[in-house]
């Protein structure tokens, strides 16, 4: 039998209201020891909360009761919505801890129990973790689409189709023993499902949305890269001097542009150098340029690296010698602010191409890997010359879906996932 756990499930006090949650087989009995009689399920009542041993009055609180399995964790739950002062919360947590058989919850344990009791699947749990960590509007919308079961519902559709295909293959094995030909319709339907899966794999992924689109500012020494970073950030984040090679290592500045998360990265000036420290910075800058999602180039246009999302900037446009910007470049001055707004719009427009559209579902690496496993198995059906082999490939695809939703083979990811949750979630 599972332990009965408790924790503060709202933000840290002080606050207007704090929520203390108890979940497990003894939750209702524990609630009665502190609040007296409990209300009907999913009904809120006001109760005096008293210490279970001394009877001391601790607070007057709203009390709610939920009966498992129709609760957020799939277990019996009691919630105390009490006053949010530190002393009140500390006293109530101490009192709950005095009830025999209860223990403090670990981070993410309430959500883990919801997963283990079938209230949510692994993709929804990942969405909840992303929702807690969301810092921009785009991140919030993508996480909410996942947490509300968007991917789970899509997987259910795929799985239903896959089970139908598997049933057709098994039926062919049982009843078509003398006919060694493979049903062309079965092959076509497997190929169609594989194509649908690969269409999802071609969508923008979750990582640029979660981690930020890497926008790298590059160019030769003294091109104005660090000044541009400071102008965009609105503060002096990078040292600026007239000495070439001042920036020896890359510096990253996280920003949100209209809800689009970006990691603005300053790099060492690209040039040949005999300085061993600067040479390391130049080498790292070269790698960052190659890995950039969006590249802001401040050098000569004909020397710009080949990049699909390149923004060519004509820096120091306020100087008399830099008045005329070459065609195809954006004139910008970090001193006067000329062109900064236009540059930010260019960055935002290019960054959005790396991100999923609002309210759509973006796959993370783990999810994409299992969908690709299923797609590969379905694609292999085309090379199978026996129905028995087709049935085996379909079984492999089902196994990939089971790992995707957490039905099987995911013990190695559970601790890492639920460890991301805060205490009480």
Image (tube, helix red, strand yellow):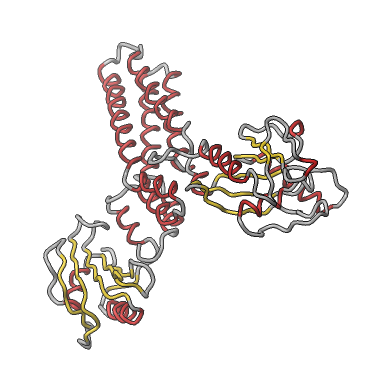
| Quarter of the image with the N terminus in it | bottom left
| 396 in relation to 223, above or below | above
Residue at 31 percent across and 72 percent down: it is 16
Residue 121 position, x and y percent, is: 33, 47
Q: Residue furthest right?
A: 274
Q: Is residue 11 left or right of residue 22?
A: right
Q: Residue at horizontal 33%, vertical 32%?
A: 158
Query: Residue 235 appears in which quarter of the rendering?
Result: bottom right
Looking at the picture, how far across and down is residue 111, in whole percent? 34, 57
Residue 96 in view? yes
Q: Splitting the image into 4 quarters, where does residue 375 fall?
A: top left
Q: Between residue 58 and residue 106, name the one nearer to us.
A: 58
Quadrant of the rendering where the C terminus is positioned: bottom left
Is 288 situated left or right of 22 in this image? right
Does any portion of residue 283 appear in the rendered image? no
Residue 364: x %, y % from top left: 46, 43
> Is 10 rendered above or below residue 157?
below
Q: How many marks?
A: 0
Q: Is residue 262 above or below residue 184?
A: below
**Residue 216 position in % (x across, y down):** 65, 44
Q: Nearer the viewer, residue 247 or 96?
A: 247
Say which residue appears at 75% left-offset and 49% top-offset: 268
Q: Nearer the viewer, residue 12 or 79?
A: 12
């Amino acid at each position: 039998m599972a332990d009965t756990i408790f924790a503060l499930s709202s933000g840290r006090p002080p606050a207007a209201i704090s929520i203390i949650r108890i979940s497990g087989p003894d939750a209702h009995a524990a609630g009665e020891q502190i609040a007296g009689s409990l209300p009907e399920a999913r009904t809120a009542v006001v109760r005096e909360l008293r210490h279970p041993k001394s009877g001391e009055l601790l607070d007057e609180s709203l009390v709610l009761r939920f009966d498992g399995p129709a609760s957020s964790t799939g277990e019996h739950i009691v919630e105390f919505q009490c006053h949010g002062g530190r002393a009140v919360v500390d006293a109530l947590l101490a009192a709950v801890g005095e009830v025999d058989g209860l223990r403090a919850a670990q981070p993410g344990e309430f959500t883990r129990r919801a997963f283990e009791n079938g209230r949510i699947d692994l993709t929804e749990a990942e969405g909840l973790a992303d929702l807690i960590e969301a810092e921009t509007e785009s991140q919030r919308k993508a996480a909410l689409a996942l947490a509300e079961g968007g991917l789970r519902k899509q997987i259910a559709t795929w799985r239903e189709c896959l089970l139908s295909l598997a049933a057709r293959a098994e039926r062919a094995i049982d009843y078509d023993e003398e006919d060694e030909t493979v049903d062309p319709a079965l092959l076509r339907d497997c190929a169609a499902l594989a194509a649908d899966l690969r269409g999802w794999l071609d969508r923008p992924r979750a990582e640029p949305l979660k981690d930020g689109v890497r926008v790298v500012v590059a160019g030769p020494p003294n091109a104005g890269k660090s000044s541009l970073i400071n102008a965009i950030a609105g503060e002096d984040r990078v040292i600026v001097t007239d000495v070439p090679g001042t920036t020896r290592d890359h510096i990253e500045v996280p920003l949100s542009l209209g809800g689009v998360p970006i990691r603005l990265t300053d790099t060492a000036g690209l040039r040949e150098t005999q300085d061993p420290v600067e040479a390391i910075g130049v080498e790292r800058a070269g790698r960052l340029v190659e890995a950039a999602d969006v590249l802001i180039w401040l050098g000569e246009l004909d020397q710009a690296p080949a990049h699909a999302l390149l923004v060519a900037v004509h820096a120091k446009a306020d100087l008399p010698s830099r008045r005329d910007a070459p065609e195809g470049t954006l004139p910008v001055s970090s001193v006067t602010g000329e062109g900064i707004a236009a540059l930010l719009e260019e960055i935002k427009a290019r960054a959005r191409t790396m991100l999923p559209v609002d309210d759509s579902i973006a796959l993370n690496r783990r999810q994409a890997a299992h969908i690709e496993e299923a797609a590969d198995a379905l694609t292999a059906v085309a090379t199978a010359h026996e129905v028995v082999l087709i049935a085996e490939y379909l079984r492999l695809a089902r196994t990939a879906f089971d790992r995707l939703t957490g039905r099987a083979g995911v013990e190695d990811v559970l601790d890492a996932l639920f460890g991301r949750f805060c205490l009480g979630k």
